[in-house]
Image (tube, rainbow, N blue to C red):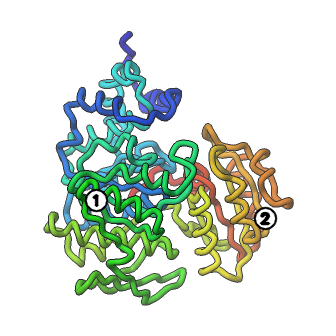
Amino acid sequence: MRQPHKEDFAETINFLYSLFKFGIKLGLKNIQTILEELENPETNFKTIHIAGTNGKGSTGAMLQSIFRVSGYKTGFFTSPHLIDFRERIRINGKPIPQKDVIEFVNRMQNSILKNKCTFFETTTAMAFDYFAKENVDVAIIETGLGGTYDSTNVIYPELSLITDIGFDHKEILGETLVQIAKEKAGIIKNNIPLITSNTNKEILDVLQEVAIEKNAELISSEQNSTLELINDNSNNLELNYSLGEEKINGIKMPFLGNHQQKNAKLAITSAMFLSKRFDKISKEAIRNGIQNTIWLGRFTIIEENPKMILDVTHNPDGMKVFVETLQKYFPTSKAFCVIGMASNKDIKTCFGILEGNFEKFVCVTPNVEKVLEAKELVKFAPKNSIASTTVEKGIELAKSLTTNEDIICVIGSHFTVGEALHKIYNKKELLI
């Protein structure tokens, strides 16, 4: 039965979110079917493909900023969003217009429902269609889950990147790092180079095995390049980059933390490699691109007195680097934690990492499906923790417990951070 046309954006978004009923499908049949109907838009522009557990978004954001500064019309497909669905699909930092989302759904909804396409399959197709229609020069494409069977894994990119691999989505990707690495390595294509930031031998062995099988050059950004810190404090992080004889000095980092320096090294090494094919990428463009990157929710200091830090960390590895960064830059400050998490995360392990670093935890319930309600989340937290209600109420409660010298950290998921940005700071649209 032919579906009625959607008249407004809210109705269109409700349709897209209704596709969650089709769950997560591992396989490329659906995305290939819908892309064929769209005349394979993904073949009409150059792509860079990024997989990994942590750091995909930050690395992609830095890389797309470098391309934009270099003068390329640059698409960026990432997930999830913080505030607005349209953040997932951007060109030169600007989200896809509402009218284009509505038009795509009206054009494709019968096929989407006929094939029972998932939310992510549909969003991936929308991104490829929009990038092709707008004639982007290049698009940075971030996987949603895994690699081998991820909907984005239909592209034949100029370069593949794999950021640090850790434990997340174990119920789908596997219980061991080797199993997870094999899934992520599925993005490696025949004769297409791979650059990775991973240093774990087990993971590197897996990537090397697949790279040899695919005749793909494997480059380690950690082994082949170096970063020298010039300044390292919460107000001024500056570094020098070296790759053999090539040097880029005086790069001002917009992010704090050793993990973000690692992501920057991966992005810069990738840009240096790609400059052979994209001749407008210069050292100056790389320096300015990194410096101009905006990527909220990654140890973002959003407010002072008391200092408020927003971070989307949501798995054990992410929690570890968050705590390390907090201790590094604010070792003597009292910190309070507002936290809301999805029910499918390793919550017990995450609290085990966080415990001892905060005066008190305030558990909240973001307004999305598949989150653990605050009254259930608090059962995993230390005994003096509090179950609040909404993210907004949780932040208000945390503020009532702190002085201007203290720190409030809002963490646990993209949606927790997104609600903090939207409801407390009235940011209606996030540009990068």
Image-based side of 4 in relation to 167, left or right: left
| Secondary structure found at label 1 | helix
The residue at which mark 1 appears reads as: 212
For marks 1 and 2 on the same chain, the one whose residue lies earlier in the sequence: 1
The residue shown at (39%, 35%) is 27
Q: Is residue 121 above or below residue 305?
A: above
| Secondary structure found at label 2 | strand
Q: Between residue 416 and residue 79, name the one nearer to us.
A: 79
| Image quadrant where one finds the N terminus | top left
The residue shown at (76%, 61%) is 361
* Residue 418 appears anywhere in the view: no
Amino acid under disc 1? Ile
The residue at which mark 2 appears reads as: 360
Mark 2 neighbour density, 10 Å: few (under 14) some (14–19) many (20 or more): many
Residue 237 spot, x, y in % from top left: 46, 82
Q: Indicate which label's residue lies in the foreground, 1 or 2.
A: 1
| Image quadrant where one finds the C terminus | bottom left
In the picture, residue 307 is in which quadrant?
bottom right
The residue shown at (53%, 61%) is 297
